[in-house]
């Protein structure tokens, strides 16, 4: 007999996860009225009660009044990649997810994961870290020996299955807006009148803003403040302002590999790939 159903959204980073989280946060009262418990970044980060600590008290003690849980935290999988020695996405994911599944006991867990073309994903990760004040010595140092066309989301999903994931629902970040009407009922277990938030969140740094920060160097004073000043001074007004550190050949190779990767994902047992 399976226990309480859980929708566990684990990212990935920079795949519109913040928009999805804020949509649930905006509708938290509606979820509660229907017996659905919500745990997102507000509850798991700002309130100082990460999921691992909550699970130590026992899974049954987490929002016991809720008959279903929706949990969203992209940091659960750990580091996104390592600069040298590995082509794995989220190399800590299998170990970390395995611990979570064990602590959830008989919960009926479905994992939800958004994926993205690796080349623009890596560029977005770099911009995001700069924006959050994490000092970097440049994009190539951030990237290390990683080649976008060698990264495979299907391998990550297979590792999550080995760790104990019963079912995995996957969608492309590029399709997020189109699949959201189908995604929400799957995560909630029912079709509720959820109103997605209208505004885009966590807009990326422009190429000009990144160039400004890189020119200031890794020893710049108050890196978080300077990143916000650069974003304000040089916003992304159109596609021409976006940060594009890869060559056309690298982008093409990444896109081709990504297309093959999606087909491999769709072929995995107990994996649902949402498409528009």
Image (tube, rainbow, N blue to C red):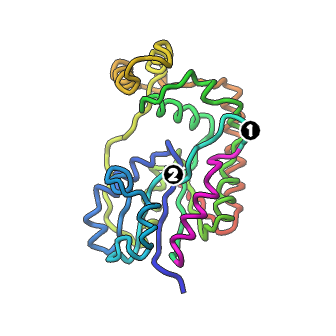
> Nearer the N terminus, badge 2 or badge 1?
2
Q: Residues within 10 Å of mark 1 (few under 14, many from 20)?
A: few
**In this view of the protein, which residue sits in the foreground, 79 or 185?**
79
- Per the rendering, the mark at residue 11 is 2
Q: Position of residue 153 (x, y in %)?
A: 65, 50
Vertical order, 120 against 35 (above or below) = above
Q: Can residue 237 be seen in this view?
A: no
Q: Is residue 92 magenta?
A: yes
Check if residue 210 falls in the magenta segment: no
Give the structural element (helix, strand or loop) at label 2: loop
Instruction: Point out residue 178 in the picture as x, y percentages from the top left corner.
Output: 47, 52
Image-quadrant location for residue 87: top right
Q: Which residue shows up at 61% across the image and 41% down it?
A: 117
Q: Can the viewer see residue 54 in this picture?
A: yes
Q: What is the distance, in whole Å, between disc 2 and disc 1 at their CAs?
A: 23 Å
Quickly name the residue at label 1: 85
Instruction: Provide the residue span drawn in magenta.
Output: 88-106
Drawn side of residue 215 relative to residue 270, left or right: left
Counting from the top left corner in percent of width and height, residue 175 is at: 52, 48
Which residue appears at 71% of the width and 61% of the height?
267
Residue at left 37%, top 61%? 39
């Amino acid at each position: 007999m399976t226990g309480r159903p859980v929708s566990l959204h684990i990212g990935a980073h920079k795949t519109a996860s913040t928009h999805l989280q804020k949509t649930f946060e905006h509708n938290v009262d509606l979820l509660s009225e229907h017996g659905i418990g919500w745990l997102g970044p507000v509850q798991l980060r700002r309130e100082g009660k990460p999921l691992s600590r909550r699970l130590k008290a026992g899974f049954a003690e987490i929002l016991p009044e809720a008959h279903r849980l929706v949990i969203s935290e992209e940091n659960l999988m750990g580091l996104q990649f390592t600069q040298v020695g590995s082509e794995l996405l989220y190399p800590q994911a299998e170990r970390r997810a395995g611990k979570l599944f064990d602590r959830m006991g008989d919960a009926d867990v479905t994992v939800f994961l958004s994926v993205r073309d690796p080349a623009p994903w890596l560029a977005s990760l770099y911009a995001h870290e700069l924006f959050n004040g994490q000092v970097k010595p440049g994009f190539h140092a951030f990237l290390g020996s990683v080649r976008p066309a060698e990264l495979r989301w299907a391998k990550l999903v297979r590792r999550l299955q080995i760790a104990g994931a019963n079912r995995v629902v996957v969608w492309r970040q590029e399709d997020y807006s189109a699949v959201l009407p189908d995604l929400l009922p799957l995560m909630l277990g029912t079709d509720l009148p959820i109103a997605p938030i209208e505004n885009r969140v966590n807009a990326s740094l422009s190429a000009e803003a990144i160039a400004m920060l890189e020119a200031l160097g890794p020893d710049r004073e108050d890196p978080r403040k300077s990143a916000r000043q650069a974003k304000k001074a040089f916003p992304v007004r159109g596609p021409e302002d976006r940060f594009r550190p890869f060559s056309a050949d690298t982008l093409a190779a990444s896109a081709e590999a990504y297309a093959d990767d999606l087909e491999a994902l769709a072929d995995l047992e107990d994996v649902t790939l949402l498409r528009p």
